[in-house]
Structures are given as C-alpha cells and as structure tokens.
Image: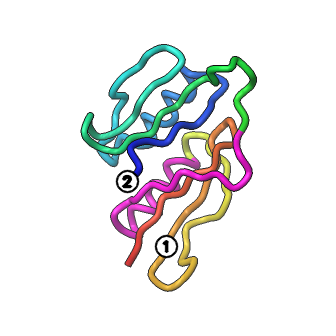
Amino acid sequence: MIGYVTIGVSDMEKAKAFWAGLLEPLGASILMDMGRIAFIGEGANQNFLAICTPFDENPAAHGNGNMVAIPAGSREKVDEMYARAMEMGASDDGAPGERMPGFYGGYFRDADGNKAAFYHMG
C-alpha cells in the first residue's frame, strides 16, 4: 500500500551517505538523485525511502510521532542493522529488543532527528 516515505534532511550529501550506506546490506542503493531529493531502495518497482531538502525552503524538521520502519528479515539482522546505524553516527532511540510477543525492533534517529526502526515480526 505504501509506495515511498519521504523525510526532510538539512544536508543532502551527508544524508545520502548515511541512508544509502546504512541500507546497502539490505540491497538498497540510490535509485534516482535529483539534487534536492534522492530515492533509495532495491528497485524501481519496490517501496523506497526518499530524502529531501524541504520544497518550501524552510529548515527540515522531524515530526513527533513520525517514524520509518524497515523490515530487517530476522532478529539477528535487526541487531546488525541497528549496530550499523550507531556506527554511522545515528543516535539511540531504543536498543533492539522484543517490544511485544512476536515483534522485535531497534530504534534510532539520523542526524536530522528523523526516527527509524529496523524490525522483525515472528
């Protein structure tokens, strides 16, 4: 149902390096880069993450309650991807763990404060 999610960033080069580098082990890369917006994913016919400097030219701001959740495929991969995010400069917003029966997730924020999670169901 969701085609893509867009998050605002203040430094496109830094954000592209972070998000493309972070998601590379899951098969993602920058699919299209149009200067103020870049699309990162596995392929043109897949869901993807867009990062952009805001169109209205106001500063990028993260939303309270907004979050991008990325399936990791296993609990071990959640741990691995969360650790990778931390190594790449993300800040912790909830270390990997079981949040409810059958849901395992690790939460972090990028340099602009955008919240994201790697998760596994089952």
**Residue 11 - label:** none
Compared to residue 12, the image places residue 77 above or below, namely below
Task: Sort mark 2 into few (<14), some (14-19) or many (20+) by Cα contacts within 10 Å.
Answer: few
The reply, left or right, for residue 68 in relation to residue 38 is: right
The amino acid type found where label 1 is placed reads Tyr
Residue 56 in percent (x, y) is at: 68, 20
Q: Nearer the viewer, mark 2 or mark 1?
A: 2
Q: Which residue is mark 2?
A: 1
Residue 60 in percent (x, y) is at: 70, 29
Residue at 63%, 29% (x, y): give it: 9
The disc, 2 or 1, on the residue closer to the chain's N-terminal end is: 2
Q: Quadrant of the C terminus?
A: bottom left
Is-magenta flag for residue 84? Answer: yes
Secondary element at image label 2? loop
Residue 52 in percent (x, y) is at: 56, 26
The reply, left or right, for residue 118 in relation to residue 54 is: left
Secondary element at image label 1? strand
Residue at 41%, 19% (x, y): give it: 33
Magenta region: which residues?
62-86
Mark 2 touches mark 1? (CB < 8 Å): no
Q: Name the residue furthest front.
A: 1
Q: Name the residue furthest bottom.
A: 101
Residue 76 in percent (x, y) is at: 39, 67
Compared to residue 116, the image places residue 28 above or below, namely above
Is-magenta flag for residue 112? Answer: no
Q: Which residue is mark 1?
A: 104
Residue 42 sits in which quadrant?
top left
Viewer-proximal residue among 111 and 83: 111
